[in-house]
Image: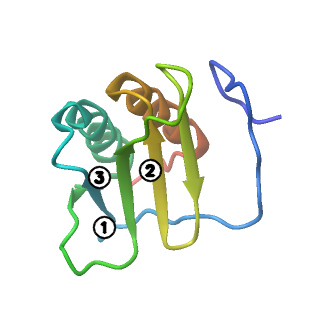
């Protein structure tokens, strides 16, 4: 069991990981400006925990990014799905609030690096 609070309704783990680094960027659907709240939460956590300044992904960037999108097929208004691969993290949520909760879960899944 993963150490997540609150614990998601469903968790499926698989081998592998995504590595955040100084080139990691984000993408969000411009048609859904409400997602900016979740993006800003992730930007703030990455800056505070890793000193990484997430930038908007370039149009031709094929990997090393976190994608935010709304998905009307998710039933719960605060529901979300996080799919992690070696090349990207894909966050889908029913609403911007769900995307924010996804960021909260994502930040609990990554190790915190301390020291200089």
- Disc 3 from disc 1: Cα separation: 8 Å
Please tell me how crowded label 2 is: few (under 14), some (14-19), or many (20+) other residues with Cα within 10 Å. few
Q: Earlier in the sequence, mark 3 or mark 1?
A: 1
- Is residue 29 positioned above or below 36 on the image? below
Q: Mark 2 or mark 1: which is in front?
A: 1
- The residue wearing badge 1 is 22
Q: Secondary structure at mark 3?
A: loop
- The residue wearing badge 3 is 51
Q: Which part of the image, by quadrant, shows the N terminus?
A: top right
Q: Mark 3 or mark 1: which is in front?
A: 1
Please tell me how crowded label 3 is: few (under 14), some (14-19), or many (20+) other residues with Cα within 10 Å. some
- Disc 3 from disc 2: Cα separation: 11 Å
Q: Secondary structure at mark 1?
A: loop
Contact (Cβ within 8 Å) of mark 3 with mark 1: no
Is residue 116 left or right of 76 when viewed as pictured?
A: left
Contact (Cβ within 8 Å) of mark 2 with mark 1: no
Is residue 7 left or right of 110 when viewed as pictured?
A: right
In depth, the one of 50 and 61 nearer the eye is 61
| Res 54 quadrant in image | bottom left
Q: Secondary structure at mark 2?
A: loop
Residue found at x 44% / y 35%: 72
Q: Position of residue 42 (x, y in %)?
A: 33, 41
- The residue wearing badge 2 is 115
**Mark identifier at residue 64:** none
- Is residue 88 positioned above or below 79 on the image? below
Contact (Cβ within 8 Å) of mark 3 with mark 2: no
Residue found at x 37% / y 22%: 97
Q: Earlier in the sequence, mark 2 or mark 1?
A: 1
In depth, the one of 60 and 46 nearer the eye is 60
């Amino acid at each position: 069991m993963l150490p997540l609070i609150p614990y998601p309704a469903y968790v499926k783990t698989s081998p592998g990981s995504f590595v955040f680094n100084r080139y990691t960027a984000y993408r969000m659907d411009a048609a859904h400006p409400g997602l900016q709240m979740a993006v800003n939460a992730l930007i703030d956590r990455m800056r505070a925990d890793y000193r990484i300044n997430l930038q908007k992904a370039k149009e031709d960037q094929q990997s090393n990014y976190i994608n935010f999108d709304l998905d009307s097929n998710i039933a719960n208004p605060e529901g979300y799905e996080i799919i992690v691969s070696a090349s990207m993290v894909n966050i889908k949520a029913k609403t911007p609030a769900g995307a924010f909760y996804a960021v909260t879960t994502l930040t609990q899944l990554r190790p915190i690096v301390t020291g200089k």
